[in-house]
Image (tube, helix red, strand yellow):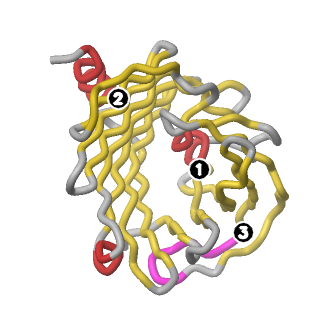
Amino acid sequence: MTRAVILAGLLMVAVTGRAEQLHYDAQVAWIRAGTVDLSAERDGDRYELSGMVATTGAMNRFFRWQGRFAATGRFVDGYPVTNAYLLLEDDGETREVLLAFQDKTTIHATDRESEEVEQPPGSDLMSATFLARHCLADGTIVHDGEDTYRVDLLSSGTSRLQGGPNAYSGPARRCAYRFYEDGRRARRITVWTAAIHGREVPVRIRIRVPVFPDGVLRLRFDR
């Protein structure tokens, strides 16, 4: 068994246990796109995050994606700084294990040779999106394990959300970003956060990608 797979197993063990559970429903235009399920655990300034992304229903006619991720790190002035990031991805044809740890990213995939590259700078995208306690500062650097993105803060403020059944309605803080990859505009992301059970978490996330309809994640309250 390779070093990357062993470390991946250890990281997955590290993020299990009692944790805050967050469940998001995804939608693209009128199509139900799937779910994102998260577990977040905090101990002082340390955090552990794990989750699963799964496409469902009509979205599978266009693409099929199943993946798990996990991250560990610590908060610095309310911002999550990643120590290790793991991605397990399976699109039905290709399986990939990606582990960013100790300044290296190790990638194992079924369709190509394993490789080890320099870990991208910044915190991982999932930690920055779901755990940051305030809007990301202009010029923040994030990564997905392989690619690096620069984040520009376009605007921030407060607004009132109107949610549907089992979704959040009420005041929320809004942070609107533009992401750049290699100097090119990659996407726009707007994150609305609100206090849920005494902890501020994203209640809605809107992702804008050129050509395609917006993707929206809404925090689901099971009643």
First-in-chain label (2 vs 1): 2
Q: Amino acid at mark 3?
A: Pro
Give the answer, above or below, for where 163 lies relative to 49: below
Q: Quadrant of residue 79?
A: top right
Q: At 65% across and 58% down in the image, what residue appears?
A: 187
Q: Of the residues under marks 1 and 3, which one precedes in the sequence? A: 3
Q: Nearer the N terminus, badge 2 or badge 3?
A: 2
Residue 198, label in figure = 1
Horizontally, residue 123 falls left or right of residue 150, namely: left
Q: Nearer the viewer, residue 27 or 91?
A: 91
Q: Nearer the viewer, residue 18 or 124?
A: 124
Q: Secondary structure at mark 1?
A: loop
Kindly tell me whether residue 44 is visible in this rendering: no
Nearest the viewer among 127 and 95 is 95
Pointer 1 with pointer 3, Cβ within 8 A? no
- Could you tell me how far apart the alpha carbons at marks 2 and 3 are, in whole angstroms? 42 Å
Q: Amino acid at mark 2?
A: Ile
Which part of the image, by quadrant, shows the C terminus?
A: bottom left
Which region is colored magenta? 164-171
Relative image position of residue 152 (x, y in whole percent): 79, 47
Asked if the stretch drawn in magenta spans residue 156, the answer is no
Q: Secondary structure at mark 2?
A: strand
Q: Position of residue 7 (x, y in %)?
A: 29, 19
Residue 166 counted in the magenta span: yes
Circle number at residue 171: 3
Crowd band around label 1 with a 10 angstrom C-alpha radius: few (<14), some (14–19), many (20+): few
Q: Residues within 10 Å of mark 2 (few under 14, many from 20)?
A: many
Q: Quadrant of residue 133?
A: top right
The disc labelled 1 sits on which kind of residue? Gly
Q: Which residue is mark 2?
A: 107
- Side of 191 where 159 appears, left or right: right
